[in-house]
Amino acid sequence: MNAIKQLCTQNAGEAAVLQGNIAFAAGCVRSGIHAVDGYPGTPSTEVIDKGLSNVQDMIKVGWSVSEAVAVSMGHGHSLAGEDCIVTMKIPGLFQAGDPFSSSAFFTEDRGALVYYLASDFTPSSTQHLVDPRPFIRSCFTPIFEPRNHQEMHEAAEIAADISRQYKTPVVILASGTLCHSEGLVRLSEIRTRERVVSSVPLKAFNTLPVTARRNYDKVVTERMPALAAMVEKSPLNVWERGSRKVGVITCGVGEMMVREVKQALGEDIDILSLGFTCPLPMNLIREFHASIEGDVYVVEDGYRYLQEELERAGLAVKGKSPANTVTEWDPAGIAALLGYSLKSPAASDVAPLPRAPMICAGCPYRLFGETVRSMKKRGKIEACFGDIGCNTLLYFMDAMDTNVAMGAGEAHRAGFIAANPDKAAKCISLLGDGTECHSGMDATRNTIFRHIPGVKVVLDNNWTAMTGGQPGPTSPVNLAGQENTFDLQASLKAHGAKVVVVNGYDRKGIRTALTSALEDAANGEFTTMVVTGVCIRKMPKSAYGTRMTVDADLCKRCGQCQICPGISADAEGLPSFNNLCSGCVSQNAACGQMCPVHAIKAAEAVDTRATARVELPKAPEEIAMPAPGSFTLPEKIAVAIRGVGGQGNLFFGRVLTQLAFLAGYGDTNVVKGETHGMAQMGGPVISTFSCGKVVSPVLLPGTADCLVSMEMSEVLRPGYVGMLRPGGTVLLADTRVLPYGVSEDAYPHRDAILGTLDGYDVIIIDVLKAALELGDPTGRIANVVMIGALSTLAPFDGFPAELWLQALRNVSPKPAIWTANHAAFNVGRGLL
């Protein structure tokens, strides 16, 4: 039985430490939801991808080609009497605005229709920071904002019951912080839900003007007053009474942050925590406001939706000014808002390295990006109108310019050319295969219909790669494993487009095809160029066996091969290949094609399995767990881990949450926060973990027992050292990861880095070297070596080694991985 099915079938009341998205997914099944549909979008993706896709025998689940289609699918399920959840992130709501708003006003019996909207107000991987609540409110659709992981687990049932009772769609507005952090959850009751049997004919569900007017009037005069009465009495609004000197009105994940501040600083603050932000329980809010003798503050993510609603109601509150740019609160910011000063170290004079997220080493998009960059430099191309997805990262190669919305690049190009016909042979548009099928094909039809010449490029890697490799219309199979029969190239040709196909690992072919297409554009033709190459994350492990070599005698040290984070040059300019090199997954290596003297070649293929070159001791099949009460649990433990995307930060955090749960912190609390999105593509990543007397997944400054930096210079990130408590430890990896395009000279000097840590207990450890010596050529188990080292430091050394090992095995139970992790952990314990 897989882990998700186990969560869906365990006894009610059992405890588990779950990511917010997984807690929600398990709650969908346990509450009897019939179907879930959606479109991949970080931070909502895991609900289906890592969660419900594993229990397709228990719930109907699938990816649609766009958010608008997913919303309409959900509406169709509800018309059939089924309760359906539709998942997406906030920009997807606006893509689906027409069906969302139009279907909001039906008032007949049907199945529940619930929207799970994940916010990303940092943002980590989202193209705008628009607060969606004013739009949702204008559709008279209730909004429930989960405040913790338990409510994430219960949200599907809460929303579906409201949807049925009040005959309305319901929005669950889930904070990205909750979606991607982990917390303690008690599993809900398992229930079944019968389909809604409606006597209302389907003809009632239309939006003819006369029907739209009738439905609108009924929603405004009947549904909304009933919902307003419901939220006034809802137990999901929580008033935590204090001394009445200071009041805080909050909602969503803001409650966790406020409680963290109150608990850490010991202040007596009255808190009114709202479960619903549409409609608002205004009578309850007025009563709370009147009870406070001093100031009343509003803490909310997004813009100022709640604050402005209260101000319009005549209530004096303090929060964000109209020009305030805070879109996501943290405990430090809330403490400052409430007037508390927190000590933090002075800002360092040593700046951290800029780390732009990059496409993966060996990605089939890279040579196309290099070709465009070269043609732009030579004036052959003036602009590239881009898209959302992995191809967005070509911006950092100077191979993409504009980028606004999914599928919009070609329409932007066409509009630009319509205004500047003489630029048709100087501009291209760039889309991914997923976004072409999402909404980009509309622009293809429009360009052909309008007879606008030019070049449109579709980078086809077969998967929805940026969000983790979910299946889409160009994938070999769908989510259910059924063979896919959609043919992108045939579809484009059927539209009337001239289609040219070229291999993404063929530099000469790309250059020739793109040059020819631009020449045709000058003669009034429109060409769609499809660049093919499977996402390397979906390639089999056997494809990673190729290793590259450099002939030092032939090499001219010209630097033309320096196009990838998997290759770097020494002080004399001689290139070498690091642990990030994928060998272009056994394709024609990009760096080799860039070399003008053919000094780079593929070496003989090698086995890259972790145990290929070193015989590791077999890991135990059973671990003897220590008896309860045989070790002492500190009241609270906190640690923060920084690194570079791809170093295993998220895995590090998952091991710590398992450790805490095994140790017995399930009786208090366990929380973990982490960075997702494009930061995983080589950008800066942070994970936070705390257990015991804790509330928030975001740490208050001065509360971490230990800081771990998997890359030496990442310890310099603003605010990071300030997380450490007095007397805490900095565990620093002796690892340097030079960002693509950054010279060796730009990397902060080791002494300068250590100088910023003067006064702290700093331990430097070469975890990457240890991983390589264990036979891992990728260095991916360096994080486990670091975990082993951490386990020997106070207060973490209070946990018996057996608990650490069991936590490692719980996260990665496969025998080969367990053997490698077991060895790496033990090596790490010995390094200090």
Image: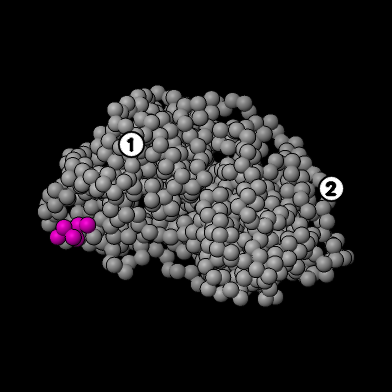
The answer to whether residue 97 is left or right of residue 608 is: left
Q: Does the residue at mark 1 contact the one at mark 2 (Cβ under 8 Å)?
A: no
Question: Residue drawn at (17%, 50%), measured in percent from left and top?
Answer: 282
The answer to whether residue 212 is left or right of residue 595 is: left
Relative to 149, does residue 582 appear above or below in the rendering? Answer: below
- What segment is highlighted magenta in the picture? 309-315
The residue beneath circle 1 is 203
Relative to 221, does residue 341 appear above or below in the rendering? Answer: below
In this rendered view, identify the residue nearer to me: 665 or 244: 244
Decide if residue 695 is in sight here.
no
Residue 382: give its label. Answer: none
Q: Amino acid at mark 2?
A: Glu
Q: Residue 596 placed where, x, y %?
A: 82, 67
Residue neighbourhood size for the residue with mark 1, other residues' Cα within 10 Å, grouped as few (<14), some (14–19), many (≥20): few
The reply to whether the magenta stretch includes residue 292 is: no
The residue beneath circle 2 is 604
Question: Residue drawn at (82%, 59%), measured in percent from left and top?
Answer: 600
Question: Residue drawn at (75%, 36%), measured in percent from left and top?
Answer: 615
Q: Residue furthest right?
A: 553
Name the mark nearer the viewer: 1 or 2.
1
Q: Amino acid at mark 1?
A: Lys
Q: How many marks?
A: 2
In this rendered view, identify the residue nearer to me: 649 or 590: 590
